Image (cartoon, rainbow, N blue to C red):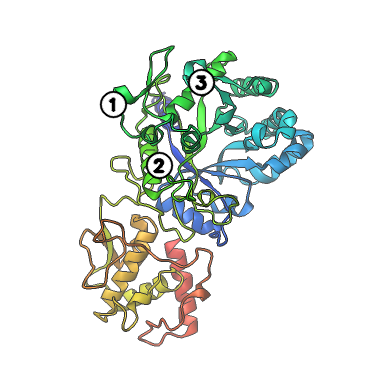
Amino acid sequence: MALLILLLLLAVAQAIADEDPYIGVNIGTDLSDMPHPTQVVALLKAQQIRHVRLYNADQGMLVALANSGIRVMVSIPNEQLLGIGQSNSTAANWVSRNIVAHYPATSITAICVGSEVLTTLPNAAPVLVNAIKFIHSALVASNLDKQIKVSSPLSSSIILDSFPPSQAFFNRSWNPVLVPMLNFLQSSGSFLMLNLYPYYDYMQSNGVIALDYALFKPLSPTKEAVDSNTLVHYSNVFDAVVDAAYFAMAFLNFTNIPVIVTETGWPSKGDSNEPDATIENANTYNSNLIRHVINKTGTPKRPGIAVSTYIYELYNENMKPGPISEKNWGLFDANGDPVYILRLTGSGSLLANDTTNQTYCAAKDGADPKMLQAALDWACGPGKVDCSPLLQGKPCYEPDNVIAHATYAFNTYYHRLGKTSEACDFNGVADITTTNPSHGSCIFPGSLGRNGTMVNITAPSMNSTSSDSPPGRNYGKGGLTSILVLIKVMVWSVILL
C-alpha cells in the first residue's frame, strides 16, 4: 500500500513537472551549410534546450534525437496536407513511418498538421480538419493519442480587432474550419498553436505600437495599453495577442483550450527599411520573452498560467528568400556560435551562453602529458576546434608546451558546446576554473573583450568531417602513426559523444 501511494505521488509530481511552462526552439534548415543532425542535438544539449519543433519529419533528426531527453514537435509540411487530408490510409502510413517507427526512443509530444494553412495555403483549408482527424485516428490505432497531441499552427493575423483583447474575434470567413477544429482540440485535450510576431505588429502599426511595448521592456502604468472594456493593463504585445486568442475562442464558446506559441522571435539584422531589426533588439526581445515564460508570469487574462513558447529559431538561415531580416532570426550561426549573448541571469541553465558566470576549461596540473597530447590532438582534429592560434608565430603559440596548448583547445571546445561540465572532461585531464587563462595577446574564447562583448569562438562547419582539419597542424611530438591517430579518434569520439 505504501509503495502504491509513493508511486501515485511520483506520478502526480511528474504530471505537475510536465505542466511547467517551457521555452523551445524551431529548427529551420534553409542553410547552405546545415549542421549534421548529431551536431544539432549536441548544441541543443549544451544549451539545455529540451523542446524543439521540426518543420517536417526529417529521419536523420528523429534518429539523432532518440534517447536525448529532448521533446519533439514533428510537422507535416503544407505540401503534404492535401494527400493526408483526402486519405485516411495516407495519414496512417505517415504516422507509421514518421511517428511509430521512432517513438518512444524519440520523445515526440505533438504533431503540427501544416502551418498557417488558412493564410498561406487557403485552397487546402477545406481538408485541414480532416487531416488533423485522420492523423489523430492513426495515433488512436497505435495507442499513442494520449501521449501525442495533434493541432495546426495558426497565424495571429486571423484574429481581428486584436486590441482591446476583450473584443477580439477570429476572421468569420474561417469559422467553417475553425469551429470544427476547436471542437477537436477541446475534445482531444489538445491546444491552440499560435504563431505570434510582435516585430511585424510593431512594423505594421504606423507608430501606434511603441517599440518598448513590443520588446517586453518595463513600462510605467501611464504608458501601458488599457483594455477599455475590462480596464486591464497590458505591458507588452505578446500578452495582448495571446489574450486576444483566448477571447476569440471564448467568442465561439470555447473556454478551456490552452494556447501554445509555436513561433515568435525578433530579427537581429534587416534592410535599410527595417532599422529596428538589430542585435540589441533581438537580444532584448528574446531575453525578456524567456524570463516572462519561465517565471510563470502568465497573461492579464490568465495570470500565473504561462504560455509555453518556441523561439523562431535556432539558426540564422542564409538561404531564406526575401529581405535580409528573413535570414537573421536565429540564436546561433551554422557553426554553433551565438549571434548574441542572451541576458538570462536568474532563469536557470536554459541557453547557457550567459556571460554573467565566467568559467573556463583548463588542463589539470599534473595530468599525464601523453593523455593531454591525445586530448589536444582530438580537440584540434575530430573536435573541430580551430587551433590555428597555436601555430608558431601566432598569438597563443607561447608558451610552447602541451599544458598551455591543451588549455586553449579545451577551453575553445568547452565554450563552443555551451560550457557544460561534460564538455570539459577530456577523459579526466581537464577541469573547469574561474581563472581566465588569457595572457598577453592570446585572448581565450569566453573572455570579455574591452568593449564588454564575448570573444567569438570560431569553429569549422558542424557537418564537416575529421578529414577537414587544417593542414600543417601537427602536435604529434611523438610522431603518431595514422593507425594510432585512427584509434585515438575512435576512442575520443566514444568518450565525448
Tell me the mark number nearer the camera, choosing from 2 and 1: 1
Mark 3 or 2, nearer chain start: 3
Circle 3/circle 1 CB separation < 8 Å: no
Q: Secondary structure at mark 2?
A: helix
Circle 2/circle 1 CB separation < 8 Å: no
Q: CA distance from mark 2 to mark 1?
A: 21 Å
Q: Secondary structure at mark 3?
A: helix
Mark 3 or 1, nearer chain start: 1
What residue would you read off at disc 2?
A: 286
Indicate left or right for 157 with 242 as reference.
Answer: right
How dense is the environment of label 1, judged by Cα within 10 Å: few (below 14), some, or many (20 and up)? Answer: few
Instruction: Tell me if residue 204 can be seen.
Output: yes
For this rendering, which residue is in front, 66 or 161? 161
Instruction: Tell me if residue 134 can be seen.
Output: no
For this rendering, which residue is in front, 283 or 60? 283
| Residue at image point 47% right, 33% down | 206
Q: Amino acid at mark 2?
A: Asn
Q: Residue 143's x, y, as percent?
A: 65, 32
What residue would you read off at disc 3?
A: 246
Residue 116 position (above or below residue 40)? above
Q: Amino acid at mark 1?
A: Ser
Circle 3/circle 2 CB separation < 8 Å: no
Q: Residue 315's x, y, as percent?
A: 49, 52
Q: Which mark is residue 138?
A: none
Q: Residue 125's x, y, as percent?
A: 71, 30
Quarter of the view holding residue 12: top left
Q: Secondary structure at mark 1?
A: loop
How dense is the environment of label 3, judged by Cα within 10 Å: few (below 14), some, or many (20 and up)? Answer: many
What residue would you read off at disc 1?
A: 220
| Residue at image point 35% right, 36% down | 291
